[in-house]
Structure formats: structure tokens, C-alpha cells
Amino acid sequence: MSGALLEVDGISVSFDGFKAINNLSFNIDSGELRAIIGPNGAGKTTFMDIITGKTRPDSGKVIWGEENVSLIKKSESDIANMGIGRKFQKPTVFEDQTTRDNLTMALKNKRKPWAVLFYHSNADDRAKVDDIADEIGLSDHLDRRAGDLSHGQKQWLEIGMLLAQEPRLLLVDEPAAGMTVDERNHTVTLLRRAAETRAVVVVEHDMEFIRNLDCKVTVLHEGSVLAEGSLDHVTQNQDVIDVYLGR
Ligand SMILES: Nc1ncnc2c1ncn2[C@@H]1O[C@H](COP(=O)(O)OP(=O)(O)OP(=O)(O)O)[C@@H](O)[C@H]1O
């Protein structure tokens, strides 16, 4: 038995003979906020693809939850249903729907097509949508068309749509990209708040953003963990310095 929410143990995956992930091990606890950094091609995206079932590793284990369920043979939708949500870099909200409708449609248990088709929101769901809107800072934008929101607001809305699914682990890919400084600061607050009740893993290149997240950092390089610890700890590590300077 392990105390971790997610345990990745010795995974490897090759593409045409190139080892994108090389004997990688990684644990995350319930309610932990973690940043993953690493140079281009370090394997960050592939790592998330493996956790979410998009890519199958050639070897190694991915173990989930208190029941220690293996995720290796699970489909992407099974893994999502088991409580792992993923936010891709580009926001994919329903532009013609309002913020409220986007959040309402995303609520847990509304996923089956017929449930959405015959769905009439009840007071309970409306309260949930209000809570999420408050959490992501869009309470004043609930009746706006999602397509009219700023880039940052769309990103928050999509995070809100993932929160509506009540994940136990949220994977977030480069949230700061394309955001203004104010939007980035709000995103930091939002992710830190989200991590109070679930685990959140953030892949990001922006070091100022990572510093503000103020959490444990895992540095990936050539598909393995190069260093782990506070941002100050890893940025003082000589191996990390060499990799970032391209030595
Ligand atoms: N489907 C694939 N086929 C072939 N090679 C791939 C595939 N997916 C990833 N790779 C290679 O695996 C390596 C790791 O890629 P990955 O996208 O995981 O890195 P990353 O750390 O996310 O990089 P970035 O910061 O640039 O997004 C890269 O060299 C990439 O070219």
C-alpha cells in the first residue's frame, strides 16, 4: 500500500527507438500542488499523456487512489471518470454558450448525451455553478457568451469546467502562456485554491509563475526526474543549471 494519490513507478516509452520517458518515477499526494518544469522535449507532455491514458507506456506502473488501481490498461474516458482531469494549453470552451451554460454542462453526472439533452438545472446545480464561478473569479461574467471572454477568462472557465467534474487530480498544461501579468497572478491564486481540496499538477515554463505557486517542483530531463524540491533547491542544483544552459 502506498499513501500517494498517484504513483508512477519506472515508466518508459519510446517513439521509433527514441526514449521520450526513461524509467520515470513520480508520486503525488492528495491535496498536493506540484509544478513540473524541464527544457523542451524533456517529456512533460508525454508524461501527462501516459497518466491520462492517451499514450501507453512500454513498461512501468501507474497506480491510482487508495485502492491502488492500475491505470495502464484503462481508456482515457475511464481515467477521466476515475477523477483525473486535464487542462490542455488551448482553451476549448463552447464559445456560443454563456459561462453559466458551459459550467452547467460540465457538472459531474451530466456527461451522458441524453442527460444533457433532457437536462433542466435544479437549485442544487445552480448553487454549484455559482460556487465554481466564485472560485474561478467569473461570478460577474456568468451571463456573458464564453466567446466574448478574454483569453485568461476562457482559461479560468475551462479550469472551472474541469472542477465541475470534481476531479481528485487536475493536470494543467502551461496555464500562464499568453496571459497578462494580472491574469497570471489570478491563475496562481486560483490553482493554489484548487489545490486545497484536490491534487494539482502544473506544467509550466514561466519561472516567475512557478515561484508564485510556491510548491514542490519536479524537474524533468530526457524523460527522467533530474531534481525535485523547492524552486530555490532545484535552481541551485548544478545538473539543472547545466541542462538549462545547454551544457
Ligand atoms: N508521438 C510521438 N512520436 C514521436 N516522438 C514523440 C512523440 N511524442 C513526443 N515525442 C518526442 O518525445 C520527446 C518528449 O516530448 P514531450 O512533448 O513530452 O516534451 P515536453 O517536455 O512536453 O516539451 P515541450 O516543453 O516542448 O512541450 C520529444 O523529443 C518529442 O519530439
Image (tube, helix red, strand yellow):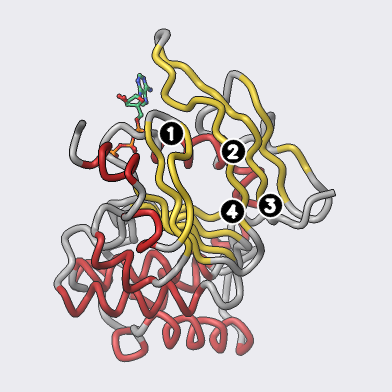
Q: Earlier in the sequence, mark 4 or mark 2?
A: 2
Q: Earlier in the sequence, mark 2 or mark 3?
A: 2
Question: What separation in Å lies between label 2 and label 3 (alpha carbons)?
Answer: 21 Å
| Identity, as a three-letter code, of the amino acid under mark 3 | Met
The answer to whether marks 3 and 4 mark residues whose Cβ atoms lie closer than 8 Å is yes
Q: Residue at x 55, y 62 (%)?
A: 116
- What residue is pinned by disc 4? 84
Query: Going by the image, does 94 lie left or right of 101?
Result: left
| Identity, as a three-letter code, of the amino acid under mark 4 | Ile
Residue 124 at x, y percent in the picture = 63, 86
Of the two numbered discs 3 and 1 in the rendering, the one whose residue sits closer to the viewer: 1
Q: Residue at x 56, y 69 (%)?
A: 107
Residue 210 at x, y percent in the picture = 33, 64
Mark 1 residue CB less than 8 A from any atom of ligand 1: yes
Residue 102 at x, y percent in the picture = 41, 69
The answer to whether marks 2 and 1 mark residues whose Cβ atoms lie closer than 8 Å is no
| Identity, as a three-letter code, of the amino acid under mark 2 | Ser
Label 1 residue SS:
helix
Q: Which mark is residue 25?
A: 2
Q: Residue at x 47, y 33 (%)?
A: 224
Residue situated furthest top in the rendering: 17
Of the two numbered discs 4 and 2 in the rendering, the one whose residue sits closer to the viewer: 2
Query: Going by the image, does 233 lie left or right of 106?
Result: left
Q: Which mark is residue 82?
A: 3
Question: What separation in Å lies between label 3 and label 1 (alpha carbons)?
Answer: 20 Å
Of the two numbered discs 2 and 1 in the rendering, the one whose residue sits closer to the viewer: 2
